[in-house]
């Protein structure tokens, strides 16, 4: 008969790697979500800058 502790010790490396893979997947997911949010903020900022430049051009008028 196999002792329960022996089975647990035998499974420890695979369980540890499984936890590592889950943590890595979570970290990658957070990084990709941050990248998408930053890209969206950049697009909003670019639109606001364009609107400001166009307003300045219109205010200057044609010379």
Image: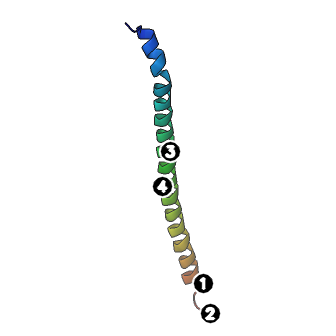
Instruction: Please state which of the two labelled residues, at mark 4 or mark 2, is closer to the viewer.
Output: 4
Q: CA distance from mark 1 to mark 3?
A: 48 Å
Neighbour tally class for label 2: few under 14, some 14-19, many 20 plus, Cα within 10 Å: few
Q: For residue 55, what is the image quadrant?
A: bottom right
Which residue is tagged 2?
63
- The tag on residue 28 is 3
Give the answer, above or below, for where 5 lies relative to 43: above
Instruction: Please state which of the two labelled residues, at mark 4 or mark 3, is closer to the viewer.
Output: 3
Quadrant where the N terminus sits is top left
Residue 43 screen position, x and y as percent: 50, 64
Side (left or right) of 37 relative to 53: left
- The tag on residue 36 is 4
Q: Earlier in the sequence, mark 1 or mark 4?
A: 4
Instruction: Please state which of the two labelled residues, at mark 3 or mark 2, is closer to the viewer.
Output: 3
Which residue is tagged 1?
60
Give the answer, above or below, for where 31 lies relative to 58: above
List the single residue furthest toward the left: 1
């Amino acid at each position: 008969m196999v002792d329960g502790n022996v089975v647990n010790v035998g499974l420890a490396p695979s369980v540890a790697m499984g936890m590592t893979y889950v943590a890595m997947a979570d970290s990658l997911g957070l990084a990709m979500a941050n990248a998408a949010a930053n890209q969206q903020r950049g697009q909003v900022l670019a639109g606001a800058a364009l609107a400001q430049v166009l307003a300045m051009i219109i205010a200057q008028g044609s010379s």
